[in-house]
Image (cartoon, helix red, strand yellow):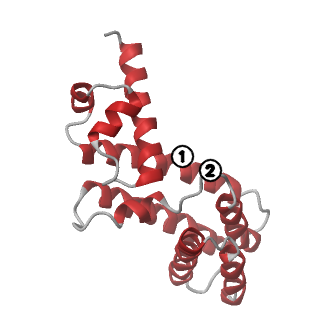
């Protein structure tokens, strides 16, 4: 197998796995379904990734990079730090209203793992830490008296809005979180 076809097979497997995991969850996405849907043999799957957990962790790492790049770009379109803090929720609402929204892949997958040291859970934790750092950067630019505390409060609002949008189907949770954010914007 040449390197191009190896790369294509690996890419197909990662894309298929991400789609299935995001739609159905880790446990509902068995190896038989991955083989059937991706067209990649079980032997090849284990060649590229030693375990299903390694495959899912790699999928989540890629999603983290893509999601954070998208989120950062969208939020940073706002001109001032205060506008960026509020824009977070406009960006989230647009995501909630997009086709295929099924909540946060990192919250969803972390909820399927009981062990805090599980590779999937560790990737989810890293994602939330990156999100927290990004939000903290904006809080520092804003001049918050305690940027760390404000960023932590904001992360709770972000994840709360995502969860309410996913579980209750209430996309206005982003608007509600934005209103709470306005009350926190005191230097």
Q: Position of residue 84 (x, y in %)?
A: 72, 67
Quadrant hosting residue 124: bottom left
Q: Position of residue 118 (x, y in %)?
A: 23, 59
Give the position of the N terminus as an image quadrant: top left
Contact? badges 2 and 1 (CB < 8 Å):
yes
Per the image, the residue denoted by label 1 is 66
Per the image, the residue denoted by label 2 is 70
Mark 2 → mark 1, Cα distance in angstroms: 6 Å
Q: Residues within 10 Å of mark 1 (few under 14, many from 20)?
A: few
Secondary element at image label 1:
helix
Picture residue at 46% right of the left edge, 57% below the top: 105
Picture residue at 37% right of the left edge, 60% below the top: 109
Q: Is residue 68 above or below residue 80?
A: above
Q: Position of residue 49 (x, y in %)?
A: 25, 35
Can you name the residue that lies furthest to the top here?
A: 2
Secondary element at image label 2:
helix
Picture residue at 37% right of the left edge, 27% below the top: 10
Q: Is residue 108 above or below residue 186?
A: above
Q: Is residue 114 left or right of residue 84?
A: left
Quadrant hosting residue 97: bottom right
Picture residue at 34% right of the left edge, 39% below the top: 33
């Amino acid at each position: 197998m040449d390197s191009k076809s190896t790369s294509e097979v690996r890419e197909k497997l990662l894309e298929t796995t991400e789609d299935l995991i995001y739609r159905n969850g880790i446990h509902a996405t068995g190896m038989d379904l991955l083989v059937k849907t991706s067209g990649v043999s079980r032997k090849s799957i284990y060649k590229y990734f030693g375990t299903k957990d390694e495959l899912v962790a790699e999928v989540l790492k890629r999603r983290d990079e893509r999601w954070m790049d998208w989120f950062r770009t969208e939020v940073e379109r706002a001109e001032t730090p205060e506008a960026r803090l509020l824009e977070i929720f406009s960006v989230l609402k647009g995501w909630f209203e997009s086709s295929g929204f099924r909540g946060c892949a990192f919250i969803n997958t972390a909820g399927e793992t009981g062990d805090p040291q599980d590779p999937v859970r560790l990737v989810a934790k890293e994602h939330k830490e990156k999100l927290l750092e990004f939000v903290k950067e904006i809080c520092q630019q804003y001049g918050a008296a305690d940027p760390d505390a404000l960023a932590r409060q904001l992360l709770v609002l972000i994840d709360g809005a995502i969860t309410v949008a996913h579980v209750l189907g209430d996309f206005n949770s982003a608007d509600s979180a934005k209103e709470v954010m306005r009350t926190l914007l005191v230097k």
